Image: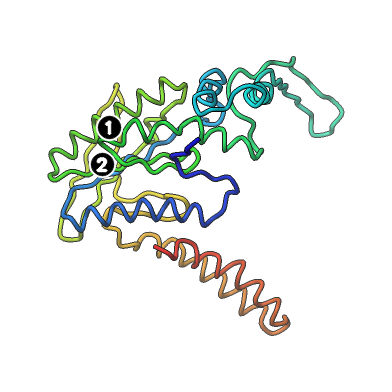
Amino acid sequence: MCIQTISWLQSKESDIEKAVFSLTDSVLSSLNLRQQIGSIFCDLSKAFDCVNHEILLAKLRHYGIRGVSLNWFETYITNRKQMVRITTQSFKHESFCRWETIKNGVPQGSILGPLLFVIYVNDLPRSINKFASPVIYADNTNVLVSVNNLKDLQTKIDSTLHYISDWFSFNGLILNMEKTNMLKFCTNHYLNNQQQCPTDNYLISEVTNIRFWRLQLDNNMNWKNHVAKILPKLSRACYAVRAMYSFSSLNTLKMIYFAYFHSVINYGIIL
């Protein structure tokens, strides 16, 4: 089985940085070639809860998981039940709803949950690789589109957005159009006019900057917004070190530094 997407099996920050690096590297490469490039930042509503069990099992079977292994996965994700318990603040009264069978979704908070979701969306990149470059990390889907002129870029973004919207719908996932944005990257010498992309009675707004895995990306790739975002955090970290300096050991100060300063400034440093 070949996993096409960038997975988060252990939720390592280095894996997240690789996903961000893949995105920024593609953008900078296209800009160096004087191409027009844009990205669709997709927002999926309750992605893990919308995984269709029958579709997931069919995809597992397609990737070669059969027999006892497939039966094990089937028993793992199907016939799960849940209920809701409401307790008063005094804990004197409790209300219960009846047990209901979970018809969709993968178990959250588990190791297998994210892996199963990665397998579920694994065929999306292969479906759109001919006209777009997806960067997928768990339930975060970003699609890069690059062409030689601005007019073709808008047309290609429209067609790509319609295609991925249909793909998500066919697989039982819900693309939240209100939170899905597009970002057209450009150099400082090129002014980009913000537009809106119509699709199925919704408007996909174009933005000039967006939050992507704790990083602030802007259309000029100059990182000014990201620097402005982390400066207050670094300032508070410096204050904490100064406040603790007079009565703390060196090891304690190091712990504060690495927890509140180094972790912030080091995140995304490969970019």
Quick one: SS at disc 1?
A: helix
> Does residue 97 appear to the left or right of 190 in the view shown?
right
According to the picture, the residue beneath numbered tag 1 turns out to be 160
In-front residue for pair 233/153: 153
Residue 111 disc label? none
Q: What's the distance in space between the residues labelled 1 and 2, CA to CA?
A: 8 Å
10 Å crowding of disc 1: few (<14), some (14-19), many (20+): some
Q: Quadrant of residue 29?
A: bottom left
Earlier-in-chain disc, 1 versus 2: 2
Q: Is residue 256 above or below residue 188?
A: below
Q: Is residue 148 above or below residue 198?
A: below
Of the residues shown, which amino acid type is indicated by label 1?
Answer: Thr
Q: x, y (%) of residue 119?
A: 51, 33
> Does residue 62 appear to the left or right of 196 in the view shown?
right
For image coordinates 68% across by 16% down, the residue present is 101
Q: Is residue 255 above or below residue 187?
A: below
Q: Quadrant of residue 123?
A: top left
Of the residues shown, which amino acid type is indicated by label 2?
Answer: Val
Q: x, y (%) of residue 43?
A: 42, 36
For image coordinates 21% across by 39% down, the residue present is 195
Q: x, y (%) of residue 259?
A: 62, 67
Question: Which of the image's four quarters has the C terminus?
Answer: bottom left
Q: Is residue 54 above or below residue 25?
A: above
According to the picture, the residue beneath numbered tag 2 turns out to be 145
In-front residue for pair 237/88: 237
In-front residue for pair 124/212: 124
Q: Residue furthest bottom?
A: 246
> Does residue 135 appear to the left or right of 34 in the view shown?
right
Contact flag, marks 1 and 2 (Cβ < 8 Å)? yes
For image coordinates 18% across by 40% down, the residue present is 153
Quick one: SS at disc 2?
A: strand
In-front residue for pair 90/232: 232
